[in-house]
Amino acid sequence: MARDRGIVNFMTPPQLPDVVEPSRLTAALRRAGALDAGAVREVKVLHQRDTVVSRIIRLGLRYVGESTGAPQSLILKMAHAAFVGTLADRGEHEVAFYTQLGPNMPPGIVPRCFDGRFDAESGSWHLLLEDLTDSHELATVPTLPPSREQSMAIVTTLARMHAAWWNHPDLGETVGTWSSIEDSAARMETFAGHYDRFADEIGDRLSEERRILYRRLIEQSARLSQRYHSHRHVSIVHGDAHTWNFLLPRAGVAGTVRMFDFDLWGINVPTHDLAYMMAIQWYPERRQALERALLNRYYETLLAQGVAGYTRGALDQDYRWSVLWHITKPVWQWAIDLPPGIWWNNLERVMMAVEDLGCEELL
């Protein structure tokens, strides 16, 4: 729907949030320090697409007056209409990351956020993010693994983010929240209920050996959770760190790998992200070819960023611990109705990693 005043090209569905009206967008950019004397004159939808749980819209901007250095385009991220208010909609959480944590991180790790809002009454939310379309790209199309060189660059940026928050004194105070022992027990009780329904539904597609593994994990979850509850060598984790949530500089462009999609961030043992990236997303041959080298690169980057008191052996132990915990991930994904193309393949891959790495020994 085209509005009067020549200011914005709205499209329905979906209805775009009011923040993209030129006057409000001008105010947002000024608050962010991205626009001085000029003003936004026109906003145009350049492209839009849906992800599993959100909607991504690329906006082109035109200005009146002085606008040197102001963004010529932005990425608008908002809720997918089908998931507003559901367990899969984590927009409020992602808005908190970009507006509270993002500004306090070293540059060149995440896209800049110009505006973010969550409305508790309606459940609607939006983010206005730096548009990296012209300078960056995905390493590969999902679900093709990246090259060795690309994987090294991705893990380097992941380590930089972890190092920035490693044992940070604000963790659990003003940055994120800790789960208590009681919280962990309640979450595992919820998981056990999901697992029982999951196992019943998929029937003989879940072997008895795997059923035993799940039962043992549930029974020993309190002991296994002690690593997290030690609050030692922890950081902010991405929570969904597959390699398609990283943007790499295009050929001939100087820059760093950037991370995006932070709707599942939290405080955790940092190897949570590494295990999710490799053990859940990659089949054995690819994982085995890169796993050791990537863990080495990750550790070297931690040391270069000033992380101390964490040994290479501790990294290996934490990685195996995280891989074991990630057998819960496909069940959680099933429970929020993600398609089998996601959770079934993740189940197969993580179970093969558990076997390869001898993670059952931790039980």
Image (cartoon, rainbow, N blue to C red):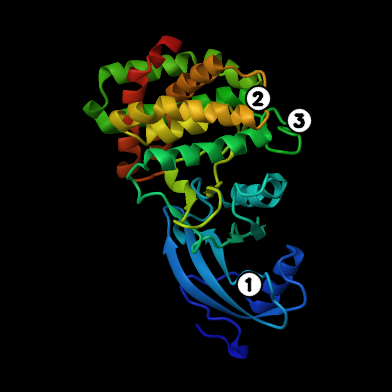
Between the residue at mark 2 and the residue at mark 1, the CA separation in whole angstroms equals: 39 Å
How many labels were placed on the picture?
3
Residue with the mark numbered 1? 18
Local secondary structure at mark 3: loop
Which is more N-terminal, label 3 or label 1? 1
Residue with the mark numbered 2? 180
Q: Point out residue 339 in the picture as x, y percentages from the top left corner.
A: 34, 45
- Identify the image quadrant of residue 65: bottom right
Local secondary structure at mark 1: helix
**Closer to the eye: label 1 or 3:** 3
Which is more N-terminal, label 1 or label 2? 1
As shown in the figure, which amino acid type bears the numbered disc 2? Ser
As shown in the figure, which amino acid type bears the numbered disc 1? Asp
- Please give left or right for residue 195 compared with residue 41 in the image: left
Local secondary structure at mark 2: loop
Q: Point out residue 233 in the picture as x, y percentages from the top left corner.
A: 64, 23
Residue 313: mark in rendering: none
Residue with the mark numbered 3? 169
Q: Point out residue 346 in the picture as x, y percentages from the top left corner.
A: 35, 35
